[in-house]
Amino acid sequence: MAEKLACTVGGRRLFRDLDLVVKAGDLVEIRGSNGSGKSTLLRCLAGLLEPQAGRVERRVDMDYLGHKLGVSARMTPLENVRWLVGLRGEKAAAAALDAALSRLGVGAARHDLCGTLSAGQQRRAALARLLVCQTELWLLDEPLTALDDAGSTLVRELVADHRADGGAVVCATHRALSSPAGGSASSSLPATRIVTLGP
Amino acid sequence: MSILLTQFRRDLLVAMRNRSDAASPLVFFALAVLLLGLGTGADALGESAPGTVWILALFANVLAMESVFRRDGEDGTLEQMLIHARPLFVAVLGKLAAHWVLSSLPVVLLSPLAAYLLHGSLVGIEVLALSLLLGTPTLTLIGAIGAALTVGTGQGGLLLSILVMPFYVPVLIFGASASTAAAGGETAFALLWLAALLAASATAAPFAVGKALAIGQDY
Amino acid sequence: MGWIRNTFHKMGSPRWFFAGSRRWMIGLYLVGAALVLVGSTWGLGFVPPERYQGDSFRILFVHVPAVSLAQTIYVAIAVAGLVFLVWRMKMADMLIAAAAPVGLAVTAAALATGIVWGMPTWGKGWVWDARTVSTLLLLLLFFGLVALRQAIARPEPAARAVALLAVVGVVNIPVIKYSVEWFSTLHQPASITLGEQPAIAVVFLWPLGLNALGYYCFVAGAVIAALRVCILEREADARWVRDWLDRGVRGPLPKVREG
């Protein structure tokens, strides 16, 4: 399992001639100041944006968590994950969905409408789909936003577990995601490199 | 099929959680009928009542079209649909089916009553309802292409109306002709055309909508 | 076959097109103007009046070329849209961007001249006829292409959205046309029968042909001119544009080196 991409996006001349290869077990942290193109790069990798030049080659299934959580305020956390699993044409046992939501700490709130939950709880509900969909590659855009300390630790654990299982994570963040337990070294895109490749 | 049903049920669920939202196309239609009756004087429409009902149904459809992807685009569930739905066009079809059931089916059901109120007679009312039943899904399918192209622009329904109205013309012509024509032969001909347009758009439009939604992510 | 591929490849290069198109633009403008001048003088001054319409028929020398051009431009845009969606050729999108406003103007001219012609001939400026309605719809389609592009902030997605809309439009045009024709056969008032146009007398045909050819050339020149502006805007950051501007707009055109 590997991910190979050579990607050049010049819509706003954010970055150019950027090469990135992600392999199983990798954690890639994209750093950079605001507006340096972190989210754009992630959206490119997710296939939501078309790079102006270059190409993205993805050999594995992926999941994307962006600024917009992808959680409907008019559905409960449980309904949200169940919808997504159904959309993938998969069947998931109710117990598995409950377990994922419980691990993220929204098990008790799984029958409440997401619109009534706090921002942190909504993000936890969104993160639950990473566990439910079980894709090899996670693309996370600032996953720690709105999370408390326990939540941040939880995300680090999830990332470490995922990598231990042979998954890979590409993440745009200002706070390090590699946990001591996670082990392997994390490569990070130096912020200066992204920014200086601007206009 | 299960993917289609998943998306269909999900959209109905979301709509039912805010019923006044879901009822607005129908309320708009009823209001338009009321205003038309007042504006033209009761029973003044006569023979053209079915055609008028068709136009009102078309406007109700186009107004509702604007919201088909809006909420999903705002909360990011549209992104998730693009990423996870496989194949995408099946999910799109489910979504549009739900949207049609919510926005146009009530109008179709109410149309005989509207025609009766405006016309004062029951002649040809079943043909009107049938032509709307065959025609409005096509409007939804075609309109969704425009809605997908404009959802990211932040511009309101006027742009969408301009984009899709020319494509609504054949449906309106066949639909209104079917329900106004007194001669049986022409009615059957127009209804067959409506059915053909529905079959063609149901086959092709979901792909175009999927493509347009993917393009719309870039705006 | 090599040269076809080569030309196609080169057509995709804005720089190559910009360098080579100036001569074409000027040539088309000159030829177009000359043909229109000859055709119009002939048509307006030397052709005998028509038997039933008198002199009012002479607007046909403007109206017919405009209608034909409007349809040709839309088809050209749709073909360019398909090319863009399949091969992502930048020039195809720029062609759409340049041709859509021109098409809008030409269609408006076709409608306006049609109304002017209709007033004395039919007794009213507008009838619900297949040809009038489909020209009006064509105007709306052109307007949609222009409006959609303006509504989208970034040029790349705007290009794809407009190309998709153009292709969807051309697929629908036969259906629209057919339905409108069917409509007009149903609703044609008996007092006005357009029917088939009578065979045009040969005396009208020559000036009409010259005028049509002239308008085609002139509009092609206008599209190329718009395309050149479009290239300069889009490629404003490219080195060759800056070099060329530095030398003064009237300076020598940029040489295109291979590779």
Image (cartoon, rainbow, N blue to C red):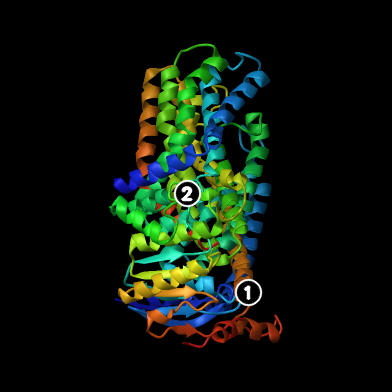
Q: What x and y, as percent, mark residue A142?
A: 52, 70
Q: Numbered disc 1: what chain?
A: C
Above-or-below relation of B149 to B28: below
Q: Please determine whether, in this image, residue C177 is positioned above or below residue B71.
A: above
Q: Which residue is mark 1?
A: C232
Count all numbered tags in the image, as a single digit: 2
Residue at 41%, 19% (x, y): give it: B126
Q: Nearer the viewer, mark 2 or mark 1?
A: 2
Task: Name the secondary structure under disc 2.
Answer: helix
Q: Nearer the viewer, residue A107 or A83?
A: A107
SS category of the residue bearing label 1? helix
* Residue C217 is at least partly visible in this image: no
Q: Is residue B78 left or right of residue C239?
A: left
Callout 2: residue from which chain? B
Residue depicted at x 49% and y 23%: B111
For the residues labelled 2 and 1, say whether their Cβ atoms are less than 8 Å apart.
Answer: no
* Whether residue C106 can be seen here: yes
Residue, disc 2: B145
> In what quadrant of the picture does the N terminus of chain A appear?
bottom left
**Measured from the top left, where is residue A167 in percent x and y?**
33, 73
Three-letter amino acid code of the residue under disc 1 = Leu
**Towards the viewer: A120 or C183:** A120
Task: Tell me, for residue A154, which label it has, or none.
Answer: none
Going by the numbered disc 2, the residue's amino acid type is Ile
Q: For the residue carrying disc 1, how many other residues have a C-alpha within 10 Å: few (<14), some (14-19), or many (20+)?
A: some
